[in-house]
Image (cartoon, coloured by chain):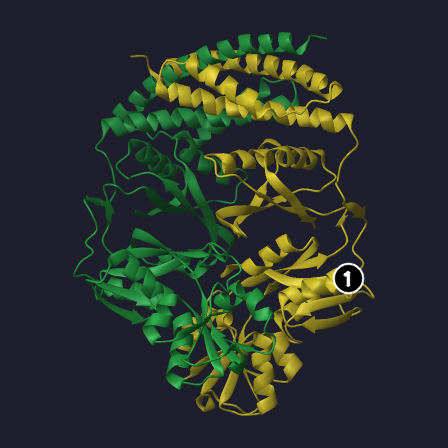
Chain colours: A green, B yellow
Amino acid sequence: MLDLQEMRKEIDVIDDQIVKLFEKRMSIAEHVAKFKIENNKPVFDRNREEEKLEALGNKTHSAFNCCGIQELYQHIMSISRKRQYQLLQEHEQADTGEFQMVDALRKKDVTVVFQGVEGAYSHAAMRAFFGEEIFSYHVDTWKDAMEEIKKGNAMYAVLPIENSTAGIVQDNYDLLTEYNHVIAGEQIIQCRHMLLGISGTELEDIKRVYSHPQALMQCREFLDSHKEWQCHEFGNTAAAAKKVSEEQDKTQAAIASPYAAEYFGLIPLAEHIYTNPDNSTRFIIVTKEKIYCKDAKKISVSYELPHESGSLYSSLSHFIYNGLNMTKIESRPIAERNWEYRFFVDFEGNLSDSAVQNALRGLKAEAQNLRVHGNY
Amino acid sequence: MLDLQEMRKEIDVIDDQIVKLFEKRMSIAEHVAKFKIENNKPVFDRNREEEKLEALGNKTHSAFNCCGIQELYQHIMSISRKRQYQLLQEHEQADTGEFQMVDALRKKDVTVVFQGVEGAYSHAAMRAFFGEEIFSYHVDTWKDAMEEIKKGNAMYAVLPIENSTAGIVQDNYDLLTEYNHVIAGEQIIQCRHMLLGISGTELEDIKRVYSHPQALMQCREFLDSHKEWQCHEFGNTAAAAKKVSEEQDKTQAAIASPYAAEYFGLIPLAEHIYTNPDNSTRFIIVTKEKIYCKDAKKISVSYELPHESGSLYSSLSHFIYNGLNMTKIESRPIAERNWEYRFFVDFEGNLSDSAVQNALRGLKAEAQNLRVHGNY
């Protein structure tokens, strides 16, 4: 038996040859691309690739190698296509779809809608993102907020999309699919829940605590140390604070933000009551206009996939082969198609980057119903 | 310029050579594996692989080819590792971890706990899976159900994990992480919501409708055609049906299952009121015992990933290279680690299959905190 050193040398010799063959193959693939561009033929030909894979598998001498070479060639052909998409990109105009680049978002004298009431975390997120010089109003539901920007009553809507502890807000992923709006920005807000009451309240006075179910959950350890309190679920933290403020009853307390305390004139009865001190919510700023900022760094897309082994894996290769860092992947069921999914991927980049355009071109050709939800 | 036919012939010649080199490389890799097994060395050596990738990149003549060959070799080395894991597998005892194979689940004279109340969809799922010859009781929360099997008060718990329209039940994914229990089965129940009232109720009598928020949402189109009704959210559909049954008030109706109608003696006032006729919920059957059936076909695992470009993609290769069909991927935030995720993957297979064992061995070596949640 050879020793490890010798075996590795042999492998190095083989690898040198593979590198040369790979470069030669890529050079021919470029000629094929030029031919396809001139003759207006599509880059991706699923049937031809499948025939090729079968032929290659037949040349191997073990079941494992058959599977291995087919996997390998799926990647070689995928890399080849990426190069062909690049050439197509050079040949044609840069394509940012319907999206227009802007220097910066307009944040003054615009109308912004948020879900919930004044004093809610979404209100705080809006203030953090836009500042004070805006017109703003609130609606009851996230869907209402989407409708308001669709009708043109507001330019922007502020919606929670993910909490660092509780995970994604599934409904808002579905609303992104339902509406043809665009994510133009994001704002992360730390959820520093406090126990709030009216002036003069002592912890001993409290009988009932009101808050959003998620906030109650996030303060579970604190609440468990006061088993004598009855916890009541409320639609949002600010509505709970509002109730306590309006009813002026010392037996009632709310769990809500420092922002709500200030807004409703309540007194913090206990601070740092949340289990996870870094608990944060990420809000997205949504608009009807197809715009992105020239310094935007993150892109959100979604697409549907057929029920095929490896299709998810193969779709992700478009990000990887273009050197794009995926930061998130989520799936949501497709309405009316039981147990099929739409995948939402966030990755780093700007719609003007050619790597991004290549990835999107490839995904558009190979996945179903690709949507770009925004670059921000 | 060559014509397409000639170019493809040239590519075929190159590919023949690559196939030969690949098989030769795999054969040497087998010797390396044997050497590693004899000398008790790990298969995966991240540093060596990274050095190798850098050296290979330096041999290419364009930035694109550098990136391409590095991607390609990540796959070649990954395929190579999979073969080495296979050899390790042949060398050692089959390893199903702590899991014991059983011929079939015990479904008679066992104690089963479910969340909710009698008449709930979870109750219906339990009956569909186990039949009638069991002892059963209900608890208030999903966590309580997990506790009951932990304490040994029940052998099985029935929990909803996913709805075909609404998506996953995030809390139950988190409970799978929190508890060291095992998924031993699953049961899909169609959600054929009906509008239920007491005997003699006419649609014109109704003023208030009670149901779970998700059921209200799933019947949105029907409810929108009766704007005069007030909709009230209830913790579950069966509790809504129970209220209507107990209060014997013709101005009240509930949206709940045919099962609840029967259980509470209510009359269907309107059927087929759901928007999606195929709307279904998938329930999991959870137990403390580490068992799987010999004919189990689906495996659920989860693992954490570091924040690295491509780490998700690379982790999925373990399923692909072992020919395992992934049917689902979900992510949940990791508690106390902001914006980091635990990925849940479902794939087809049985813990006794060597392909499954290879995949798990590879994932265990390369991902963090791999958990097998069950084979069912």
Left/right of residue B316 with respect to residue B134 in the rendered view: left
Viewer-proximal residue among A188 and B283: A188
Looking at the rendering, which quadrant does residue A375 occupy? top left
Mark 1 lies on residue: B155
List x then y, in percent, for residue B35: 71, 16
Q: What residue is shown at x 30% (from left), y 21% (from top)? A: A35
Write the residue at 17% across / 58% down: A108
Q: Is residue A40 visible?
A: no
Residue situated furthest left in the rendering: A109
Horizontal and vertical percent for residue A5? 63, 9
Judge whether B189 appears above or below B46 on screen: below
Q: Nearer the viewer, residue B292 or A6?
A: A6
Q: In which quadrant of the rendered view does residue B196 lie?
A: bottom right
Mark 1 neighbour density, 10 Å: few (under 14) some (14–19) many (20 or more): some
Q: Quadrant of the N terminus of chain A?
A: top right
Which one is in front, B197 or A6?
A: A6
Seen in the image, is A209 located left or right of residue A93?
right
Q: Residue, x 20% and y 56% (percent of image)?
A: A107
How far from the left and from the top, in percent, is residue B154?
A: 76, 65
Q: From the top left corner, tell me how far across and down residue A227 is, in percent.
A: 61, 75
Judging depth in this view, the residue of A202 and B369 nearest the camera is A202
Question: Tag 1's secondary structure?
Answer: loop
Q: Tag 1: residue type?
A: Met
